[in-house]
Amino acid sequence: MTPRITLVRGDITRESADAIVNAANSSLLGGGGVDGAIHRRGGPAILAECRRLRASRYPEGLPTGRAVATTAGDLDARWVIHTVGPRFSRRDDRSELLASCYRESLRVADELGARTVAFPAVSAGVYGWPMDDVARIAVETVRSARTSVEEARFVLFDEGAHEAFTARLG
Ligand code: ADP
């Protein structure tokens, strides 16, 4: 099955979903942007579990393109799925790594049994990707995924992001 794709403009930390995806960095120890917002609103339980994951499974950090789940703490969700997007580079094409973030997040969601998954525009902030590229890769990857997730909801923080995703869905 491929998930139904929905678009919402807003703050992902206000969403209700089985799983909320975080655009984390490989340290898993928090950062700015959506990562900071998720930890702020989700409370300390998320960071505590991230620290345990660092100490046990990912002593060198979570590799780019991979995803791992923790509790969602105080968020209106059961899990947060942390994925590490690639930084944008003009020199090498890192699209496959960005696609991998969406694919791996859906794979982790499947393992958990999550049916609704909310995604931010991974790598479109501090990591510098053009929003149109993120929208294209995100939509193509989710559309070609085989997963039990029923709804993939892109939660776009600003009007430009919402327009870019709307244009891609066509
Ligand atoms: P990255 O480091 O992967 O680029 P950022 O958090 O800097 O991650 O940005 C990713 C995208 O998430 C950007 O488009 C940014 O505007 C958006 N964003 C920031 N805060 C939120 C939020 N609370 N809810 C949804 N999207 C957000």
Image (cartoon, grey):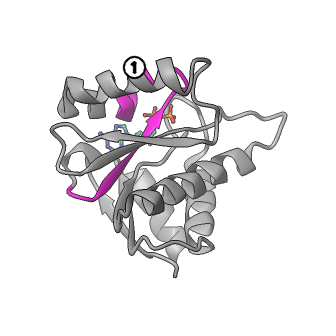
Q: Secondary structure at mark 1?
A: helix
Residue at horizontal 50 percent and vertical 59 percent from the top: 106
Q: Position of residue 38 (x, y in %)?
A: 29, 34
Is-magenta flag for residue 25? yes
Q: Is residue 16 left or right of residue 58?
A: left
Relative depth, front residue between 105 and 8:
105
**Which residue is denoted by mark 1 in the rendering?**
51
Magenta stretch holds residue 15: no
Report the residue at 63% width, 73% height from top: 144
Q: Amino acid at mark 1?
A: Arg
Q: Quadrant of residue 49?
A: top left
x and y, in percent, of residue 117 in the image: 37, 60
Q: Residue furthest right?
A: 91
In the picture shown, does residue 63 fall above or below 55?
A: below
* Residue 10 image point, x, y percent: 26, 51
Residue 69 percent across, percent down from the top left: 41, 42
Q: Is residue 72 left or right of residue 31?
A: left
What is the magenta range?
16-36
Q: Is residue 19 visible?
A: yes
Q: Please name the residue shown 19% across and 48% down the image.
A: 14
Ligand 1 resides in the quarter of the picture at: top left
Q: Residues within 10 Å of mark 1 (few under 14, many from 20)?
A: some
Q: Relative to 26, is 20 above or below?
A: below
